[in-house]
Structure formats: structure tokens, C-alpha cells
Amino acid sequence: MKSADLEVLERALDWLDDGHQAHLFTVVQTWGSAPRLPGAVLVVRDDGHLIGSVSGGCIEDDLADKARNQTLPNKPSVLEYGISREDAQRFRIPCGGRLQIFVEPLHHSSQLLPIVQNLRERKLTKRSVHISSGEIKLTQVLPEGSPRIESGWFHSYFGPQWRLLIIGANQLGATLASMAQALDFEVLVCEPRQEIRDEWHVDGVTWVYGMPDDVVLEIAPDAHTAIVAVTHDPKLDDMALLEALKSDAFYVGVLGSHKNQEKRRDRMRMFDL
């Protein structure tokens, strides 16, 4: 499963490689109610085809019309929607909302290929575009920031897809997987027990085979990774914890009663965790 940003940018690369022109739109800032958060991206092809979104649909339709009529900016620019009441009604922006969008014409795949490569490698990257010249700079950063226009540059942030490693393919694990997928997480599942793995019913997950400690090491958890152990088997859950607690995962959790959690903490202390 790919992140929404990676899917949008890879499709844009395909369009550019096929000889199309396109525009990349990024939500910079919103006021009031807005369907999409700052950082949301949309790419519109020169014939009006689009992928991604920056609003609820009406703004996308307007941008597609402008692409077909060749009235989009031919250099990096800023657009604002919802400034007037008529504007808000026309584009159906809810509850007095307003949004600012950065527009970047795309002519060559070289404008997107470096950031796509970084996303594929799960690197958190700041992408900076000089508004006057169109120059692009990439900087690996931590932590992630918010899109902004500053000193003649537009800065946006692209990071790896959030992912959840579930240790245990039982009913609770399946429920967690479905919830995480709805939030655009990549879901990985580890279940050494074949008889339990055979009963899994949630599509779209990635199976990682092996014992839990080896699997944690294999996926190399980063700051966009959460790990949850729900096997109800202390041996398997503890194996996952032994490596997960030493990793960069932003969240590590394990299911158990208060009594069992105290015993688990005692066992972890034996390993200086």
C-alpha cells in the first residue's frame, strides 16, 4: 500500500514521461472549515485529468477547467479561494472556510523524481521551491514541519507513510488493521502461528514472516512506525517488545491485564528495558 502523496506524485511522473504538462497544487494554509489539511496535494494534467485533492471537489473542478483552457499560471504562484462570500458559495467551501494554494507548473520529471525517490526510501524531506526562479531544493529534516511561504521560497514536507506493525493475527488484530487502513496507514502483520494466520480476513495488509523479534529488526522501525502486540502469548509479545522498545518507533503497545502488565514490566527490566 502506498501513501496518498506517493501515489499522486508517481502518477504525475508517468504523465510527464508520457509528454504531458501538469501543475502541482499544495494546500499552504486554511482558515475556518476546510476538507483538506495543509500539505494536501493535487496534480492536474493539461487535459484536465487529475489525481489527489485540495478540497471537496468544486475547487478541483475549477482547476481542471483552467488546465483545459490553458489559464493556469506558467510560473510558481499562490491562489486563494473563499476570500469573498460569492467565492465561498461558488466553490462550496463550508462554514466560511478559506484556503491558500501554492501552484507549481510541472514540465520535466526531474522536478518530481528526487522527492519520489526519497518517499520510496521512507526519508522525511523538506522540498523548497523558489517562487521567482522555480529552483528546487531538497533537505532531509526531522521533525516534520508545516507548509509555509518564507523569504521568497515555498517549503513543503513529505514523509514516509505512517505504518502499523501488528503482532498477532487474531480478531483484535484484524480490527486494528481495518482502523489503521482507514487512516491511510500501511499495515504489516506478523503471525508465526499458521492456524491463526489462516483465519485472517482483512485484505490489503503486508505479511511479514518470521518470529516477532526478527520481524521488528527486519522492518527497521522509524519515527513513522507504530508496533502493537496482541497475540495473548507472553512469549511472542515479549519477543516483539525486546526489539521494539529499542527502536525508533513512535508508539509501542501490548495488550494485557494490569496483573500481566506488571509481570511483563518485571521481565523487561531484566533486559534493562
Image: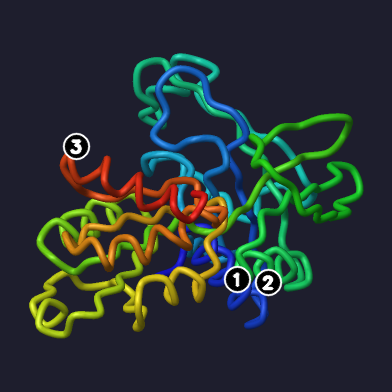
Looking at the picture, the colour scheme in use is rainbow
- Left/right placement of residue 18 relative to residue 84 reads right
Secondary structure state at the residue bearing disc 1: helix
Residue 144 at x, y = what percent?
A: 64, 42
Secondary structure state at the residue bearing disc 2: helix
| Residue at which label 1 appears | 120
Real-space Cα distance between discs 2 and 1?
A: 5 Å
The reply to whether discs 2 and 1 touch (Cβ–Cβ < 8 Å) is: yes
Residue 202 at x, y = what percent?
A: 17, 69
Real-space Cα distance between discs 2 and 3?
A: 45 Å
Residue 258's label in the rendered image is: 3
- Left/right placement of residue 85 relative to residue 192 reads right
Give the answer, above or below, for where 182 lies relative to 96: below
The reply to whether discs 1 and 3 touch (Cβ–Cβ < 8 Å) is: no
Residue 261's label in the rendered image is: none
Viewer-nearest of discs 1 and 3: 3
Q: Residues within 10 Å of mark 3 (few under 14, many from 20)?
A: few
Q: Residues within 10 Å of mark 1 (few under 14, many from 20)?
A: some
Residue 117's label in the rendered image is: 2
Could you say which quadrant of the image residue 150 lies in? top right
Asked whether residue 197 appears in the rendered view, the answer is yes
Query: Residue at 13% across / 65% down in the picture?
Result: 170
Question: Does label 2 or label 3 sit earlier along the sequence?
Answer: 2
Q: Amino acid at mark 1?
A: Arg
Could you say which quadrant of the image residue 212 lies in? bottom left
Asked whether residue 43 appears in the rendered view, the answer is no
Give the answer, above or below, for where 98 lies relative to 242: above
Nearer to me, 5 or 214: 214
Q: Amino acid at mark 3?
A: His
